[in-house]
Amino acid sequence: MGLLKTSQKAQEDPTQAAGAMPLPELDDADPMQRRRAVRMRANEPDAVAALVGLLAREEDNLVRQTAFLELAALNSDEAALGVSELLSAADPALRNGALEALSTMPEHAVRLLEPLGYCPDPDVRIFAVLLANELHVESTSDWLMALAEREDDANVCSNLAEALGGTGRQDVLPILQSIIDKFPQEPFLAFAAETAMQRIREG
Amino acid sequence: MGQATSAQQVPRISVEDITAFCDFFYKKTGISMDASRRYFIDRRLEERMLANECKTFREYLSLVKFQAGGAEMQALINEMTVNETYFFREDYQFTCLTRRMLDEIADNKDPRRDRIRIWSIPCSTGEEPYTIAISILENWKRASEFDIEILASDIDTRVIAKAQQGIYQARALHRVPTNIRETYFQQIDRDNWQVIKDLRESIDFSIVNVTNPAHMARLRNIDVIFCRNLLIYFDDISRRRAAEHFFDALNPGGFVCLGHSESMSRISNIFLPRKFPEALVHQRPMK
């Protein structure tokens, strides 16, 4: 007992004991096997469809994290598009996971802002604004301004106000004012837009 | 691509070369390098190109990519990694290990059947795994009840060789109390102290790249992982991959200890934060 010498453990090293394991399936009852399956599927041509399909029904956080990680690592237009479909999921954790995965592939995710900004679901448009804020890509501020000019949902505009405040651009000031004017009955929006305007003025 | 000058001069490396190299090195090791380290990268690449008598960067990169056996890739990794450390560095985590984590782990094990396995990655020149061993022998009362394995790994072959030798100078030993030095070290000349043979033979050193799934698949049934100040060199995806590999390597209830400036919650939510009086560590859930 005590510290084992390397010579003592050579014969019975548990790391060497594992035998061949059967190929796992994405619908295995055991979450650990589903994780293994996720990793193996990640290299196959239909990986995006398979992993996004899994995420839509998967409830285990560990399996979800692995699937999001593999999709993010694919770092492609197809992966970004697949992940973006999950922004409209009912489960907030799934939506947040999708947002996080998209933010790690900025060059592909930035192309999705335009279509996401026209999604009829205001929650998806909110996620698009949050995503734009996460991407740290210069062109996103133009997109935020364009969306703010046509947006008529107060909750989306609230997020837009915060994101526009972070751009540091003087030319967003009239757009922020237009948000205030657009929703005279929503004092929280006036507060959000004025805070953003003050942030820009103070540099 | 880089231009050759004369045989005696350092080959020039262009910005494009550096970008191509950083991309390649990241894919191989998970280590993310950026322009802020340009001088560091240039110097080491130039040294390796001269050592291999490569006249252009393209020639050198081909050697690294396609050489049978991968010796030059390993030499390059050795040059690019930083290995400065000392005994009992950030020792509050070792206190936490012997006061809290090991007892919790031991309570879920049968000493007649189960081992306790601790893994130090990256172990650099060995200061950390030897500190773990000494801390356990000195401070954990139940050490004699269990078989305890200490594994230590690094991506750098050169430091592993030094770690196995276990020879250190005053700089590495400055936080070692005199009684510990006298018990676990032997002075071999005026400037050098060597870890005693018994202790050297208790650490299982190996080469491991934490972003390599094949390497990581060999590591299982670990109870505590010390991975301090490594993930700061990785980008987001590589950090998350490493976290997933650590999760798989750990037994349920096992712990990960990161460096003081690192935060698992910013990497992944698959571990539970455990706040002990001495340290915040990260635990694989029991179920």
Image (cartoon, grey):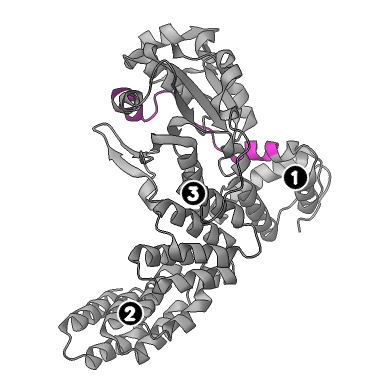
SS at badge 2: helix
Pointer 3 residue: B239
Question: Can you say whether B230 is above or below A12 in the image?
Answer: below
Q: Is residue A13 above or below residue B48?
A: above
Picture coordinates of residue A40 (x, y %)?
A: 60, 52
Which residue is more in the foreground, A19 or B55?
Answer: A19
Q: Residue furthest right?
A: B7
Callout 1: chain: B
Residue B25, image x, y percentages:
64, 49
Question: What residue is drawn where x is 49% and y is 68%?
Answer: A83
Q: Chain of mark 2?
A: A
Mark 3 and mark 1: Cα distance apart in space: 25 Å
* Identity of the residue drawn at 66% across and 42% down: B44
Q: Which of the numbered marks, if any, corresponds to residue B64?
A: 1
Q: Residues within 10 Å of mark 2 (few under 14, many from 20)?
A: many
Decide which of B287, A157 is in the foreground and name it: B287
Q: Is residue B85 visible?
A: no
Q: Nearer the viewer, mark 3 or mark 1?
A: 3
Q: Amino acid at mark 1?
A: Val
Circle 2 residue: A160
Q: For the point 50% across and 78% down, which residue is it?
A: A112
Disc 2 to disc 1: CB gap under 8 Å = no
Q: Is residue B209 left or right of residue A112?
A: right
Question: Mark 3 vs mark 1: which is more N-terminal?
Answer: 1
User: Is there a contact, CB below 8 Å, between mark 2 and mark 3?
Assistant: no
Type of amino acid at the residue the image marks with label 2: Leu
Can you give x and y, in whole percent of width and height, for residue B62 in the image?
A: 79, 49
Q: CA distance from mark 2 to mark 3?
A: 31 Å
Check the image and report above or below for A121 versus B1: below
